[in-house]
Image: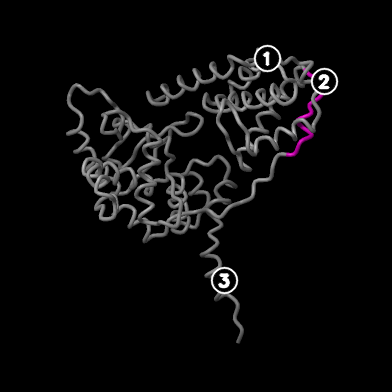
């Protein structure tokens, strides 16, 4: 396991402990139960979802502290109370801040609640699994946003020769140009996730074989390969990286900030947004959209959805089909000439 992932897991475990501090002790039992088949990040999200759920129960159902809510209280809940919680999630206040959840946010939180009730019903802690009677919100499929070939070139060119950035951004770009080009090239040339990208160490890259090692979701490590074009961009960055860090710096990350520390996911998201807003102003591009771009281009070149699924690290090929096989614009264009009238 990489040092980055070890540090990330430590932070998640601390977050879990903090989230459970003001919850009933049986919430800890639930989180402990799922430890063997979930990552620390997944458990942190579960714990945070339970915090929101018990805060709702505390303030809107039982009018008592979350920590004092008992199994008897849970036994008194009706399915309509869980439906009320779903409605509440649309727009709610927690610790003085307001939050909004769409279909995906609601679906994830109700999934946590369902798992929580199922666990406690299975272990005879409650008499009825009322959450199982509540339907999970339907998630409507949205058209996948991706960059076209000319937009990909514009994106990288904007990082390499920033003619449209503000003067302040251009001044900053002088110090980050090779890094930003290397980052964008790696995303667009391999389809890796942003978490995988920031976790790469220098020792993980093999330039002789144009390959690098990444840690996938769940902790599995795989070898991925990159083109000579990506190789050139990475090597240009390593020259500048060596100038930025001195012999006393022990940072092992491939991509670092000007503060000589491993670059954060937020920083990567911001730089993608900065350049893409110029290259493709009508599209809201994120690192994940660059992943979609690579997946689409790979499918167009190979026509093999299983190859795309393997390279992108999808456990279920149906996920790949949903996102990359349905290249609607291409399908509509080709269909136009399929039916002959005369």
The Cα atoms of the two marked residues, 3 and 1, are separated by: 57 Å
Left or right: where 7 falls relative to 55: left
Question: Please, what secondary structure does the residue beneath circle 3 have?
Answer: helix
Instruction: Count neighbours of disc 3 (C-alpha within 10 A) and say few if under 14, some if 14 to 19, many if 20 or more.
Output: few
- Labels 2, 3: front one: 2
Answer whether labels 3 and 1 touch (C-beta < 8 Å): no
Q: Mark 2 points at which residue?
A: 127
The Cα atoms of the two marked residues, 2 and 3, are separated by: 56 Å
Q: Nearer the viewer, residue 26 or 199?
A: 26
Q: Which residue lies furthest to the front in this view?
A: 96
Instruction: Count neighbours of disc 1 (C-alpha within 10 A) and say few if under 14, some if 14 to 19, many if 20 or more.
Output: some
Where, quadrant-wise, is the N terminus in this rendering? Answer: top left
User: Percent x, y for residue 268?
Assistant: 37, 39
Closer to the chain start, of discs 2 and 3, is 2
Q: Is the magenta stretch mostly helix, strand or loop?
A: loop
Based on the picture, tell me whether residue 69 belongs to the magenta stretch: no
Q: Give the range drawn in magenta.
A: 126-135
Closer to the chain start, of discs 1 and 2, is 1
The Cα atoms of the two marked residues, 1 and 2, are separated by: 15 Å
Q: Please name the residue shown 38% across and 52% down the image.
A: 277
Q: Please name the residue shown 62% across and 15% down the image.
A: 28
Q: Name the residue under label 3.
A: 335
Question: Please, what secondary structure does the residue beneath circle 2 have?
Answer: loop
Closer to the chain start, of discs 3 and 1, is 1
Q: Quadrant of residue 246?
A: top left
**Residue 26 numbered tag:** 1
**Residue 15 numbered tag:** none
């Amino acid at each position: 396991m990489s040092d980055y992932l070890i540090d990330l897991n430590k932070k998640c475990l601390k977050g879990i402990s903090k989230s459970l501090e003001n919850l009933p002790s049986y919430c800890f039992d639930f989180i402990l139960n799922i430890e063997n088949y979930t990552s620390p990040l997944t458990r942190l999200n579960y714990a945070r979802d339970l915090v929101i759920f018990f805060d709702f129960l505390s303030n809107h159902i039982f009018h008592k502290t979350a920590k004092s809510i008992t199994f008897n209280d849970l036994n008194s809940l009706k399915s309509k109370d869980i439906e009320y919680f779903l409605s509440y999630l649309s727009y709610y206040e927690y610790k003085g801040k307001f939050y909004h959840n769409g279909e995906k946010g609601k679906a994830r939180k109700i999934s946590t609640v369902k798992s929580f009730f199922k666990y406690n019903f299975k272990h005879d802690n409650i008499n009825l699994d009322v959450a199982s009677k509540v339907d999970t919100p339907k998630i409507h499929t949205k058209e996948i946003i991706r960059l076209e070939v000319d937009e990909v070139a514009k994106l990288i060119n904007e990082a390499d020769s920033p003619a449209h950035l503000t003067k302040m951004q251009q001044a900053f770009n002088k110090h980050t140009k090779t890094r930003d080009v290397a980052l964008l090239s790696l995303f667009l040339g391999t389809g890796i996730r942003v978490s995988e990208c920031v976790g790469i160490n220098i020792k993980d890259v093999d330039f002789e074989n144009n390959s690098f090692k990444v840690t996938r979701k769940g902790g599995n490590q795989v070898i991925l390969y990159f083109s000579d074009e990506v190789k050139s961009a990475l090597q240009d960055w390593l020259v500048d990286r060596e100038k930025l860090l001195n012999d006393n710096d022990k940072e092992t990350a491939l991509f670092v900030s000007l503060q000589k520390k491993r670059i954060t996911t937020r920083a990567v998201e911001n730089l993608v947004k900065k350049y893409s807003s110029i290259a493709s102003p009508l599209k809201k591009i994120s690192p994940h959209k660059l992943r979609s771009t690579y997946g689409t281009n790979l499918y167009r070149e190979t026509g093999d959805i299983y190859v795309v699924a393997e390279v992108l690290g999808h456990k279920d090929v149906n996920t790949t089909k949903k996102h990359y096989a349905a290249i609607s614009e291409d399908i509509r264009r080709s269909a136009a000439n399929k039916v002959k009238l005369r």
